[in-house]
Amino acid sequence: MQFHKAFGSAAGIGYIGRGGGTVAAALTGIGWIFIPWHRLPSLFPIYIAVAIGMLGIWSAGRLENVWGKDNRQIVIDEVLGMTVSMLGIPVLPLYVLVAFVLFRYFDIAKPLFIRNTEQLPRGWGVMGDDLLAGIYTNLCLRLLLMFI
């Protein structure tokens, strides 16, 4: 259970209470800026997103038994959402900032069927809304970059 608590809370970020999801998303975005992506295989970010997603579903599902449904201490879903937001997007501070703002909008407002994913069972519901928010953010960023 210790692994699930550490992973689900994104190494303890979820324990800060209110705003933990925002902090987790912001730190994920900052992390993207400092990772030397050019030295890693091109599909590495996708592998990372899949790993975070699968482990997050598992951990969130287990943690719901301990902390309750979609507890605010579980912030690995925000890490996944920001990771998906940046897949295939040039890693420039401005783009990361725009991704952060768009992702938080989609995650908080939950438009376009995002809210419906919360009804999925166990860890799938916890992770699903942020995954979809990340996908929408990524698509919006791609549209913006087409016009820049």
Image (cartoon, rainbow, N blue to C red):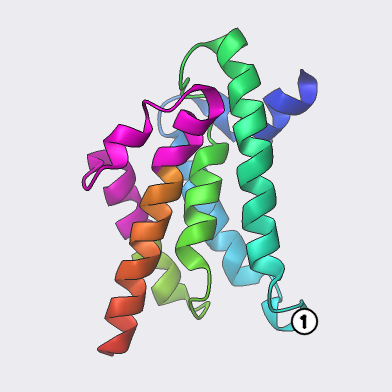
Residue 80 in magenta?
no
Circle 1 Cα neighbour tier, 10 Å, few/some/many (<14 / 14–19 / ≥20)? few
- Residue marked by disc 1: 39
- Residue 12 showing in the rendered view: no
Q: Is 82 or 44 nearer to us in this picture?
A: 44
Q: Nearer the viewer, residue 56 or 76?
A: 56
How many labels sit on residues? 1
Residue 67 pos. (x, y %): 55, 12
Q: Residue at x 46, y 16 (%)?
A: 69
Task: Give the residue drawn at x 65%, y 47%.
Answer: 52
What residue lies at 46% left-to-right and 22% top-to-bottom? 70
Quadrant for the N terminus in the image:
top right
Identify which residue is drawn at 49% across, 67% down. 86
Residue 105 drawn at (x, y percent): 27, 50
The span picked out in magenta is 100-129
Please provide percent x and percent y for residue 21. Answer: 45, 38
Magenta stretch: dominant secondary structure: helix
Residue 39 in sight here: yes
Is 38 rendered above or below residue 99? below
| Quadrant occupied by the C terminus | bottom left
Q: Secondary structure at mark 1?
A: helix
Position of 37 compared to 3: left or right?
A: left
Q: Amino acid at mark 1?
A: Arg
Q: Is residue 26 above or below residue 21?
A: below
- The location of residue 13, given as percent across then percent down, is 59, 34
Q: Specify whether residue 122 is painted magenta.
A: yes
